Image (cartoon, helix red, strand yellow):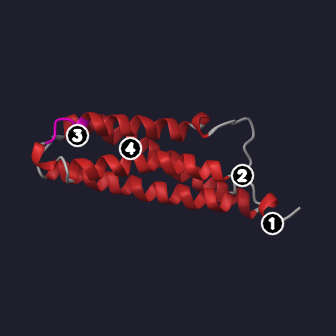
Amino acid sequence: MNIVEEDKVTYGKINSYKDLVVWQRSMELVKEIYFVTSTMPESEKFGLTSQIRRASVSIASNIAEGWGIGVTGNYIQHLKISFGSLCEVETQLLLIERLNYLNQEKLFKANTVLLETSKMLKSLIVSLEKQRKN
């Protein structure tokens, strides 16, 4: 058995990245981001709107890509990239609010899903890092 085989992600009963609740929540976050940015000023179409949409898509995409590679170290790295994108989305939501493009009330659901996704993603990273050390 080589080092790569020993380092494979333990999937258990999960057959696909689509079974991961964190991936499902990240997809919900993308939907919320697209929804809230649909009312952004036209002048932001190629600016903040485009940037936050790409960053939100990156969260779910990196969870899926890391899963597909199937090696724990690479998976953790992709999850950390996902977490970085999540922080980027959080920052951009704060900018949207500070620029008065949307108020807190309109951003509430996106922020709620973002927080849930953040907690799940962080827990998954910590869990995989512990599993990898054992």
**Residue 53, placed above or below residue 7:** above
**Residue 22, placed above or below residue 130:** above
Q: CA distance from mark 4 to mark 3?
A: 15 Å
Mark 3 belongs to which amino acid?
Thr
Q: Quadrant of the N terminus?
A: bottom right
The region drawn magenta spans: 36-40
Residue 77 in the image, given as x and y percentages of width and height = 57, 61
Queried whether the magenta region covers residue 68, the answer comes back as no
- Relative horizontal placement of residue 68, taking residue 95 as reference (left or right): right
Dot 3 crowding, Cα within 10 Å, few <14, some 14–19, many 20+: many
Looking at the image, tell me whether mark 2 or mark 4 is earlier in sequence order.
2
Q: Which residue is mark 3?
A: 37
Q: CA distance from mark 2 to mark 4?
A: 25 Å
Q: Main secondary structure of the magenta part?
A: loop
Q: Which residue is mark 2?
A: 9
- Residue 100 seen: no
Of the two numbered discs 1 and 4 in the rendering, the one whose residue sits closer to the viewer: 1
Circle 3: element type: helix
Residue 33 in the image, given as x and y percentages of width and height = 30, 40
Looking at the image, tell me whether mark 4 or mark 3 is earlier in sequence order.
3
Looking at the image, tell me whether mark 3 or mark 1 is earlier in sequence order.
1
Queried whether the magenta region covers residue 37, the answer comes back as yes
Dot 2 crowding, Cα within 10 Å, few <14, some 14–19, many 20+: many
Q: CA distance from mark 1 to mark 2?
A: 12 Å
Q: Which residue is mark 1?
A: 3
Q: Which residue is mark 4?
A: 114
